Structure formats: C-alpha cells, structure tokens
Image (cartoon, helix red, strand yellow):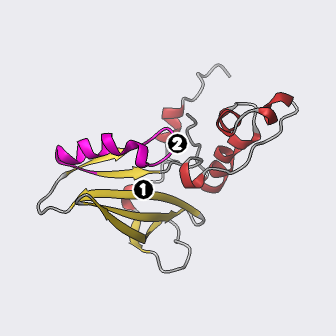
C-alpha cells in the first residue's frame, strides 16, 4: 500500500489515547490501582527556608509509579503551578537557586521523575556486543548510549502501559 507512515502524534491522538483526564484519582491504600485509576501516596515532607517540599508517588497502570515533589511556600491564596522536568529527573539541591527564584515570583512547583530517570532510573550499565567499549563508559554515557540495553527501560514501560514512550 502507498499510505503515508503514521506519525507519533497521530498515534497519541488516536483511539489508543487513554483519556487520563477521566481516570479516577484516589489515595493509595497498599493495593495496585485498578484500570483507569491513579492512586497518590504521600511519602513525607520537609520544610526549608519557608518552603515545604512534599514527596509523593503516583501509582498507575497497575505496577508503575511516578515519583514527584510538590514544592511550595506556606502562603494563603492560589498560586500558579509550574511543572519542573530536569535532565536527570525531578529537582535536586543543585536546582535550588532556580527553584527558589520561581517560588519567589509566585509559582508552586511540581517536579516529576519521568520513567527511566531519577528514582525510576535503572541502576546498572549494560554490555552491548555492538559496542564493547560501552562497559568502560561512565554511568551517564552508558545510560544514554543508543546501543545500550539500559534504555530498554522505555520499551519495558511501553509494554506495561500499551503505549509508546518518549526518549530524550
């Protein structure tokens, strides 16, 4: 057939779209979330320089978790919310100068570990017969090498969720 190839955007906007906006959201109760359900779990909080940092985990798609931080100043009233995606996952202490600048200008921050980064990062290096020197690489280079089996984390997640995932 001479049909144009399906684009990634077309796949995401197709009938395969999970319609997450209609999923039930509830507190995590030590049971896997059901179909079309997200369960949130509070994992503690800390206060620093008038800022509260709440640690949470969103449980979804049966066995998957999405770690996140809710960083906000203790003030009354509604504030704008900013999503923070770092190159290696959610915000860290090294990001504090930039994070505090946004807090001071009226934002609360949700910082998320995308699949395969931060807390969900696979903690090993792979050996690839296509690139024998890979094992000699440092962890960062081995992890993002396109020949490395480490990035298969994206494939595993797409199999679990039935949806393709983005690589960086």
For residue 168, side relative to residue 142 (left or right): left
Q: Which residues are magenta?
A: 85-108
Q: Is residue 140 magenta?
A: no
For residue 125, side relative to residue 80 (left or right): right
Which quadrant of the rendered structure holds the C terminus?
top right
Classify mark 2: residues with Cα within 10 Å, few (<14), some (14-19) or many (20+). some
Residue tagged by mark 2? 88
Q: Where does residue 108 sit, x and y in percent of width and height?
A: 25, 52
For residue 158, side relative to residue 98 (left or right): right
At mark 2, the secondary structure is loop
Q: Is residue 157 above or below residue 149?
A: below
Tell me which residue sits at (34%, 58%) in the image.
Answer: 70
Q: CA distance from mark 1 to mark 2?
A: 25 Å
Residue tagged by mark 1? 20
Q: Where does residue 134 sit, x and y in percent of width and height?
A: 79, 32
Q: Residue furthest top?
A: 2
Residue situated in front as seen by the camera: 63 or 20:
63
For residue 59, side relative to residue 42 (left or right): right
Classify mark 1: residues with Cα within 10 Å, few (<14), some (14-19) or many (20+). few
User: Tag count in the figure?
Assistant: 2
In this view of the protein, can residue 137 be seen by the observer?
Answer: yes
Q: Marks 1 and 2: which is nearer the front?
A: 2
First-in-chain label (1 vs 2): 1
Which quadrant of the rendered structure holds the N terminus?
top right
Tell me which residue sits at (23%, 48%) in the image.
Answer: 103
Choose top left, top right, bottom left or bottom right for residue 24.
Answer: bottom left
Tell me which residue sits at (54%, 29%) in the image.
Answer: 7
At mark 1, the secondary structure is helix
In this view of the protein, can residue 36 be seen by the observer?
Answer: no
Choose top left, top right, bottom left or bottom right for residue 20.
Answer: bottom left
């Amino acid at each position: 057939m001479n049909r144009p190839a399906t684009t990634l955007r077309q796949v995401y906007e197709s009938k395969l779209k999970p319609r997450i906006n209609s999923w039930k959201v509830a507190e995590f109760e030590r049971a896997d979330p059901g179909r079309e359900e997200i369960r949130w779990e509070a994992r503690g909080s800390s206060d620093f320089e008038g800022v509260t940092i709440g640690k949470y985990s969103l449980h979804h798609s049966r066995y998957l978790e999405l770690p996140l931080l809710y960083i906000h100043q203790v003030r009354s009233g509604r504030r704008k919310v900013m999503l923070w995606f770092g190159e290696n996952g959610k915000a860290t202490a090294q990001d504090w100068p930039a994070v505090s600048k946004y807090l001071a200008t009226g934002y609360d921050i949700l910082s998320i570990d995308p699949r395969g980064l931060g807390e969900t990062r696979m903690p090993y290096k792979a050996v690839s017969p296509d690139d024998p020197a890979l094992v000699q690489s440092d962890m960062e280079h081995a992890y993002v090498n396109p020949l490395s089996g480490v990035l298969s984390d994206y494939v595993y997640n797409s199999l679990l969720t039935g949806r393709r995932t983005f690589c960086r």
